[in-house]
C-alpha cells in the first residue's frame, strides 16, 4: 500500500494568516504544511501538499492522487460550495477522503452550509482551525491501519 497522502487546498488559502484572521486565524499555509508534515512523519506517511486558486489544477491533483495515494485531506475552500467538477473528480478515488474547513462553515453565511464535497467525504472536520488538518491525518492513519 502507498504511504502517500495528498493534502489539497483551494482558493485564497495561500493568504492564510493575512486574510480575515478573526475567521481563519494567524497561522499561514506554510504553518499548516509544517504541521501536516510533522503529523505525517509521526504516522509514517509521505505528504503531497498543494494549494491552488485554479479549479482545474485541483482536479488534476485529484486525478494524480487516484493513481498514487492511499488517502486525501482536502480543504476545497470556496469550491466546496460550487464545484461539481471537483466532486466528480473525487468520485473517481477509491480511498478515504477527509474534508477540512478551518472555520465552522455552519456558523457562517447560509451559502456556506452546503458542500458538494461532503457527499463523497469519509469525514468532515470544521471549526478546529489549522488543527483540523492534523486531526484528519490522524483519523486517516487509523483507517488505513485497520
Image: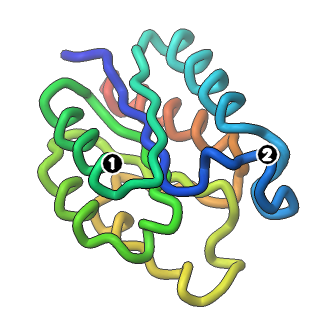
Quarter where residue 125 is shown: bottom right
Of helix, strand and loop, which one carries label 2?
loop
Q: Which residue is drawn at the image coordinates 25% and 43% (left, top)?
A: 62
Measuring from the top left, give residue 46's x and y in whole percent. 40, 15
Instruction: Look at the numbered disc 1 and give the secondary structure of its residue.
Output: helix
* Residue under numbered circle 2: 17
- Residue 131 lies left or right of residue 94; in this view the side is right
Residue visible at 58% across and 20% down? 39
Q: Is residue 35 above or below residue 11?
A: above
Q: Which mark is residue 69?
A: none
Whole-angstrom CA distance, mark 1 to mark 2, is 22 Å
Q: Position of residue 42 (x, y in %)?
A: 56, 11
Q: Residues within 10 Å of mark 2 (few under 14, many from 20)?
A: some
Quadrant containing the N terminus is top left
Q: Position of residue 113 (x, y in %)?
A: 54, 81
Residue 63 in the figure: left or right of residue 10? left
x then y, percent, for residue 28: 73, 38
Residue underneath mark 1: 58
Q: Residue at x 63, y 77 (%)?
A: 106
Amino acid at each position: 500500500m502507498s504511504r502517500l497522502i495528498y493534502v489539497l487546498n483551494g482558493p485564497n488559502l495561500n493568504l492564510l494568516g493575512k486574510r480575515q484572521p478573526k475567521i481563519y486565524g494567524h497561522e499561514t499555509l506554510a504553518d499548516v504544511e509544517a504541521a501536516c508534515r510533522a503529523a505525517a512523519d509521526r504516522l509514517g506517511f509521505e505528504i503531497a501538499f498543494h494549494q491552488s486558486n485554479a479549479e482545474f489544477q485541483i482536479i488534476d491533483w485529484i486525478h494524480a492522487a487516484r493513481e498514487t495515494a492511499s488517502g486525501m485531506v482536502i480543504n476545497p475552500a470556496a469550491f466546496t460550495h460550487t464545484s461539481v467538477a471537483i466532486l466528480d473528480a473525487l468520485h473517481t478515488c477509491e480511498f478515504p477522503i477527509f474534508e477540512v474547513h478551518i472555520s465552522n462553515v455552519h456558523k457562517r453565511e447560509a451559502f456556506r452550509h452546503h458542500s458538494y464535497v461532503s457527499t463523497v467525504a469519509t469525514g468532515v472536520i470544521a471549526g478546529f482551525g489549522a488543527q483540523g488538518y492534523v486531526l484528519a491525518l490522524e483519523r486517516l492513519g487509523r483507517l488505513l491501519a485497520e
